[in-house]
Each structure stands twice: as structure tokens, then as C-alpha cells.
Image (tube, rainbow, N blue to C red):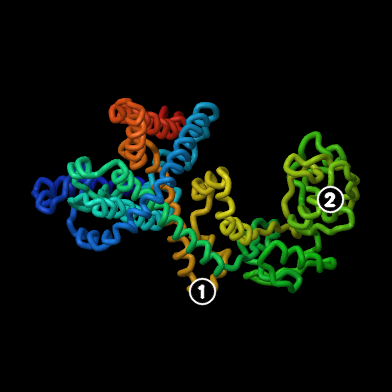
Amino acid sequence: MHPKLSLTPEGLAVIAFVVYWLAVEYLKSRGFLEKHNISSYGPLLIIRTKKGLNLLEKISKPKKLWKFLATAGIPAVFAGMAFMFALIILMDVVMLKSPPPPSAVTSPRNVLLIPWVNTLFPPLYLLIALIVTLVVHEFSHAILCRVEDIKVRALGLLLLLLPVGGFAEPDEAELNKKANRLQKIRIFSAGVISNFSVAAITFVLFLLLLNFLSPVVFVAYSSNPRIHQGEIVYSINGVPVSTPSDVNRALKLSHNEIKIVTDTGSYTLPDITGVRIAGLYKGYPAEKAGLKKDMIIYMVNNTYTPTLQSFEEVMSKTKPGEVVTLHIYYNGKKEVFHVKLTKSPYSSSGFLGVEVYEYISGLELGYSSVLLKELKSMPYQLKSVRGWLFFVAMPLMGFKGFVGNTTKYFKPHVLGSYLFVILTALYWIGWVNFYVGLFNCLPAIPLDGGRVFYEVFAWLLNKLGLRGEKIADAAVKYLAYLIFASIIMSVIIPNISYFRGL
């Protein structure tokens, strides 16, 4: 018998790409592409069309409004330019001093936002977001061209099996001859400004729609063979639960046993609740006092701490030097420890020096309210540079939208499961617009930021009596070398072992 052949998704993608390329070459040889005003460079198709130009004329009619919006948005382009250039330099330092190990995040295929090639992001939502982003970006350039009375020859799409870009094709001769520096800056900035604007609008809608979701409590881990990970917890001791506060309140009603109702049944468990010690900091009070791993702290002083939230609340009110009484459950016995706290390295409160997790009769609960709260706090996080960095990297840190099993842990109040689709689409459209806008801010030709930087730098140098155009041209070229070399380095350095094995 012959072994059964099976193709991986990567293999299927390669076959599809080869078939596509052969089709392109065949259509080119038959004159089909030229007849329909389509150019090809290898597998890359450049599809031009005059459709949409009439709509473009109508949209660009309120010229004063468009000029005002474009001018008002220019500072955002320079802010994005400074942020991204600083991020590139920071990335270079990290790569040279302490490069990250190979991972899905550093994989070469995941550097580009190409659906079905990038394995980190949901492909369909990524494709929708890219189409919206490209249309918005390029159409904005075209609108500003017409606002500044520059002819647009065609609109178009770049196709590499999938859409990978879009463009508006202005009359370059008119652009260079008729437009002054400010007009050029407005035209070059338009795409970035529009991407930022769409990102802001979609994220506002995303945040508003989050209010129509309710969180749930679920089993994050279980050592009980009857209760399984992922089960939704409806109530504890007769109290409906959806947040850590609900669980804390319900567990304080316990007397010898806990009654839990999940989506698979009702269970009665022994009342052993608290925080379980997962690790101890060497040299800190807990270790010195003789506490051990797997001990369960169920009361601090005279306050029961059945949940992680209650434990953290009690500890936040302690002071360095204070002696606390810890009531411990360990190996079937109850013990008492008196521990003198030290200063917390994270706050002004007292510190035990333990790593703990919630323990509820062999269960560890998860709370989708934590994610919901974090998502709703995004606008407040943007008050700091750290918040912006988190926002840029958010999809890389695990949140892919309301897809897959994530939807199980939220209850929509309107639209049913369609609310998850809308929220996820808004999330990706917002993030991709923001990311593409930021990337295009980089001061490197052929990016928009490079062209804006050239015009402003040349103007400043001319004011100083220097050869502005010549120096600015050299500057943006060298910046382009630096930036794209940095991007290539960020792919190669974490994957050196991989490339050596090729």
C-alpha cells in the first residue's frame, strides 16, 4: 500500500500561489492583462481603473473642509513619526543587547499583515480590515489631490493572490509643478490622517458596544474529576456570580460546604477556599516564617480571604513592619503563623513575599470581567507612552477579538452572536488602520512619512540658506536604509538558528 499524502496549510498555500502565478503569466501572454489596463511584475498585478473618479469629484467638493481637516491632522503625522522612529531605535537596542528567542511573534511569516500567511491574526477579519484600510488610505490621497486641483489618472489595486495594497495614481508632473510645499504635505499626510481617524471612530464604537456584553465566571483549572476546565459557573451558594466581587460575597456565606452550579450540573464541595502559595520569594518574610508551597491562606488576621480579590484587599491595607496573623490550611490541618511584613517593592503596603493563586475546593476560577475592564480602560491607558506601546502590541499579547472560545465567556444583550462579529470587525479595522497609519509615518521613502519629512526638512534647510532639496533627499534615503535594515534585523536576529538550519 502506498502511504497517504497529506498537505499542510502551508503546502496548499504554495500550490495556490503557483497556480495563480501560472494563470497571470498565461493571461499576460494572451494579451488579456494589457487589454484591461492591468500591469504585472512577476506575480504582482497592478489593476488600474477609472471607475470611482466621478465619485471622487463629488466627495472632494467641500474643499475648504478637506483642507482644514488635512491641515489640522498634520501634527498627528509628526507625532506618529517621532513615536515610530523612537520605537525603531528601541527595537534595535533590544535586538542587539538581548534579542528575543524564536517564537510565533518573531516568525518571518508573521511580520507582514497578509491573511492566511500571518498565523497570529484571524485571516478573514484581517482581510476585511486591510481592504478598509487600503481603500481609506488611498482614496484620501486621491481626494486631497482633487482638492488641490491635481489630476488623478486612475485608482488601483495591488494583487498578490490576495489584495496587498491600493493606490491613487496622481499626475506626478502636475503635482511637482502646481502644488506648493503645504499642498504636498496635505496630500501626502491625507492617508495617515484618514487611517488615524477611522481607527478613532471604530474604537469609539467598539468601546460603546462593549457595554452590551456581560461577563461570566468560568473554571480556569480543576483538579476535581467531576468539574472540567471551561465550564461556566452560574451561582455559588445560591448567589448568581459574574465578577470576582460576586464570588467573594458568595463564598463568605459558606458553612462547611460550597454549592456550585455550572452549565453542566450542580456540585457540593468541601469549604476549603483561599489563596494557594505557588512560590516564595527567597529571603522575604513568608519564607523566613516557615511558610511552604501549596499552603492555603484562608484568613489574614480576623478577615476571611476566600478569593484572590479579598486577599489582595486585606494585604493592600497593611504596612511595612506590621505583624499579621495568617490562618493556613495544609495537609488536612489548620495552622497559624505570625509574620512580620516588609515593604512591598510595588507599593507602600506591607509585603509577604509569596506568589499565590485562587483556590476554591480544587478549582481556580477565571473572570471575563477582568478582560472587559481592561478593554474599557484603553482610553485611560493612552495617557502614557507605556499605554501606547501596549495598544500597538495588544493583538500580539493574546487578544484576537471575540472569536473562538472567547465568545463562550461573554453574554451579549443585543444581536446575539452577531455582536461578537461586529465587535471583532471593529477591533481589527481600528487596529489595522492605526498600525498602518503609524507605519506610514516613518520618515523613509517611499512611505508617506518620508515624503512629508522631505518637504519639511527641505523647507527648513532652504530657510537657513542651504541646499535643502539635495540634503533632504540624501537624509530620507539614509533614513530609509536605517529603518528597513532595522526591520530586516528584527526578523533575522531572533531566527538566526532557523536560518542556519536552512
Relative to 154, say whether 103 is above or below.
above
Task: Report if residue 87 is visible in the image.
Answer: yes
Q: Which mark is residue 414?
A: 1
Residue 322 position by quadrant: top right
Judging by the rendered image, the residue that carries numbered circle 2 is: 330
Circle 1 SS class? loop
Asked whether, in this view, residue 319 is left or right of residue 172, the answer is right
Question: Label 2 amino acid?
Answer: Tyr
Relative to 160, say whether 443 is above or below.
above
Circle 2 SS class? strand
Q: Position of residue 106 (x, y in %)?
A: 46, 38
* Residue under the image location 80 percent in, 40 percent down: 343
Q: Position of residue 445 (x, y in %)?
A: 32, 36
Q: Are marks 1 and 2 in contact (CB under 8 Å)?
A: no
Q: Position of residue 40 (x, y in %)?
A: 18, 44
* Residue under the image location 49 percent in, 50 percent down: 395
Question: Label 1 amino acid?
Answer: Val
Task: Report if residue 331 is visible in the image.
Answer: no
Quadrant in the picture for the C terminus: top left
Marks counted in the figure total 2
